[in-house]
Amino acid sequence: MSTTVQVSVPATTANLGPGFDCLGAALTLSNRFRFSPLPEAAPLKITATGEGANQIKVDASNLVYQAFCRLFAQIRQPVPAVHIHIDAEVPLARGLGSSATAIVGGLVGANELAGRPLARDAIASLATEIEGHPDNVVPALLGGCRLAASGLDSAQTSRPWEICELLWHEKIIPIVAVPDFELSTSAARSVLPEQYSRADAIFNMAHLGLLIRALETGRQDWLRAALQDRIHQPYRTQLIQGFDAVQAAALEAGAYGLVISGAGPTLLALGAPETEGAIAQALQTTWHSQGVTARVQVLRIDTQGTVVSMG
């Protein structure tokens, strides 16, 4: 294990409106992790640069290292001494899957140093187990837009996740607005109800089905309708200052819709190539008028997923 391993993991946007906890897409923004083996008796070393580097833990509680250790526990091998360097581009606690990049990065880095004992589907299952749901970790690992559903065997007990790649039309452009405040996933989940009505469940099932077809075909009318949700967004928008104004401005600028990215507070607009600039400007200006400074980026769907290089 003398070779340094470099792992690049893309940011993700999850839920996409009605796809709560099961749908996510990888974006062209990434965190990079470098794993350098150290002499056997050397202490753990973690360093960080880039976005929010001063907030990244550099001890054994670091999530990258926790995932790194988890893989070695899975294969029943001792955890080797390692220097982990994190070069961060994905903002922390903003709804763009920063924790998923850490989990996937740690697992893949460990798997490479251990000689690749686990296949990608096993890593996906392990990452989902650590994260608690698949919507971010699966596209972070595999790239593209992915739908995940738990399988059932004949005894009706859960078995590994079924992962389905969804087509994403090239003319549907993701535009993210990242505000200057954080929103933890636990806080965003705490406002959700324990139970939902049958009407709301049916509404979301119908709209998720429509969203899948809209993403594949690029049909604008379907996409505008499909991004609606009754499971999480009506409850979480109260946690995001200026949401209604930003949503109205995005739609006026030509967006098909505006949704909360993951647990938030980042907002994701979907639009056409010819309107992406106007949408980005509307997001920036309107949130500023609401007293929020935001960084707006026009991105694309990352189709590679996690990329490994050596040396």
Image (spheres, rainbow, N blue to C red):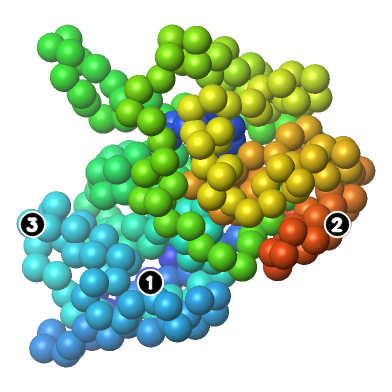
**Counting other residues with Cα less than 10 Å from the Cα at mark 1, is it few (<14), some (14-19), or many (20 or more)?**
many
In the rendered structure, are the residues bearing label 2 and label 3 in contact, judged by CB atoms less than 8 Å apart?
no
Provide residue 61's location: percent of width, then percent of height: 24, 72
- Of the 4 image quadrants, the one containing the N terminus is bottom left
Q: Residue placed at 18% from the left, 88% from the top?
A: 43
Q: Which residue is mark 3?
A: 76
Provide residue 97's location: percent of width, then percent of height: 48, 54
Provide residue 197's location: percent of width, then percent of height: 43, 14
Q: Amino acid at mark 3?
A: Arg
Q: Which residue is mark 1?
A: 5
Numbered label attached to residue 281: 2
Disc 2 to disc 3, how far (Cα)? 52 Å
Judge whether residue 68 can be spotted in this image. Answer: no
- Earlier in the chain: of badge 3 and badge 1, it is 1
**Counting other residues with Cα less than 10 Å from the Cα at mark 2, is it few (<14), some (14-19), or many (20 or more)?**
some
**Residue 309 higher or lower than 86, as above or below:** above
**Residue 152 higher or lower than 118, as above or below:** above
Provide residue 267's location: percent of width, then percent of height: 64, 49
In the rendered structure, are the residues bearing label 3 and label 1 in contact, judged by CB atoms less than 8 Å apart?
no
Considering the numbered disc 1 on the image, is that residue within a helix, a strand or a loop?
strand
Q: Residue placed at 29% from the left, 21% from the top?
A: 151
Q: Nearer the viewer, residue 140 or 276?
A: 276
Camera-side mark, 1 or 2: 2
Q: Amino acid at mark 1?
A: Val
Horizontal side of 131 relative to 302 (left or right) equals: left
Q: Nearer the viewer, residue 304 or 159?
A: 159
Judge whether residue 5 can be spotted in this image. Answer: yes
**Residue 17 higher or lower than 279, as above or below:** above
